[in-house]
Amino acid sequence: MQSLFIGHTYIDVTLLSDKMPTGDEKEVAKDYAVSFGGNAVTAAFACAKLNGPVDLICTLADDWLGSMFVDMAERYRVELHPRKVKRSSLSFIMPRDGKRAILRARDDAYLTPAPDLDLTDCKALHLDGHLSETALDYARRCRARGILTSLDGGGLRDNTEELLGYIDIAVVAERLCEQMNLTSEGMLDYLKKRGCKIGGVTEGEHGMLWYDEAGVVQRLPALPVPKERIIDTSGAGDTFHGAYVAAYLADPSGRWKDHFLFSRAASAHKIQHLGNEAGIPSRSDVEKARKEFEA
């Protein structure tokens, strides 16, 4: 095991349409995509495509959507360690004008206990806070072993504050700042106080405000992808997380600025494609985005 991801599995149905029908209306979508979904789950698939096999603790149901997810994981060399649930979870996503509306249906009534994995060869752990007790347990275990721990702080959960005490790399969303009544700068101060070595707040088209290994706060601007080429921003943050884990695994002694430059280009690729699977880049896709947009 080189890296371990822990998160809740969704099957994402992404619909490109100018209108959401209501009542007895009917509409035909311009395009659609069906893919794996979930924050840490999508990050795991991105990391696998960019850097090779990963391990994933996630929810899994014995239904036809679950079977589809197992097939996708096999193709991407994602080794599943499931916590069984009765039904697969779904996300219906409608991207429009650089934003996206999401409706989710979730089953998080676990039928089986968390798997107990051997962490001997693990180099990195990435979490999104779901499977809260499992996430906290593995964060503690990895911290004790000196294994890099990373958190996607997409929103406030019941374990967020405690979990941050075991996190090395915390990249959070503006939504978490709003929920905690903090500015982006205030959130960075909070992450420093919680002991996070690297902290950042993603701000969409404005890029990311973050602090480096020396605690220096700086801004990483978003790459200037033309508006007419932006199709689907959903999953861009998850791709960003998976890509920086991949960059770290490829060069553990590298600067985090370089890891984030790599993951920024991965996100720039993602937003030009509909759905998570179509948008996850290869290393050549990342380099292409850097060459086109960084100049």
Image (cartoon, rainbow, N blue to C red):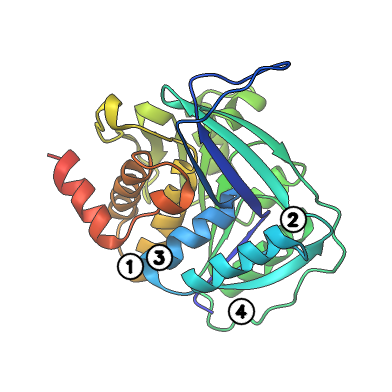
**Which dot, 3 or 2, sits closer to the camera?**
3
Residue denoted by label 4:
119
Mark sitting earlier along the chain (1/3): 3
Residue denoted by label 1:
253
The local crowd at label 3, few if under 14, some if 14 to 19, many if 20 or more residues have their Cα within 10 Å, is: many
Give yes or no for contact between labels 4 and 1 (Cβ–Cβ under 8 Å). no
Residue denoted by label 3:
49
Secondary structure state at the residue bearing disc 4:
loop
Which residue corresponds to the image point at 70% horizontal and 43% vertical from the top-left?
Answer: 161
Which residue corresponds to the image point at 57% horizontal and 35% vertical from the top-left?
Answer: 93
Residue denoted by label 2:
131
Quarter location, residue 248: bottom left
Secondary structure state at the residue bearing disc 2:
loop
What whole-number distance in Å separates the C-alpha atoms at marks 4 and 2? 18 Å
What whole-number distance in Å separates the C-alpha atoms at marks 3 and 2? 24 Å
What whole-number distance in Å separates the C-alpha atoms at marks 4 and 1? 20 Å
Secondary structure state at the residue bearing disc 3:
helix
What whole-number distance in Å separates the C-alpha atoms at marks 1 and 3? 21 Å
On screen, residue 125 above or below 117:
above
Which residue corresponds to the image point at 80% horizontal and 49% vertical from the top-left?
Answer: 107
Q: Position of residue 272 (x, y in %)?
A: 33, 39
Q: Position of residue 106 (x, y in %)?
A: 76, 45
On screen, residue 236 above or below 144:
above
Q: Assign the C terminus to one quadrant of the image.
A: top left
Mark sitting earlier along the chain (4/1): 4
273 vs 49, nearest the viewer: 273
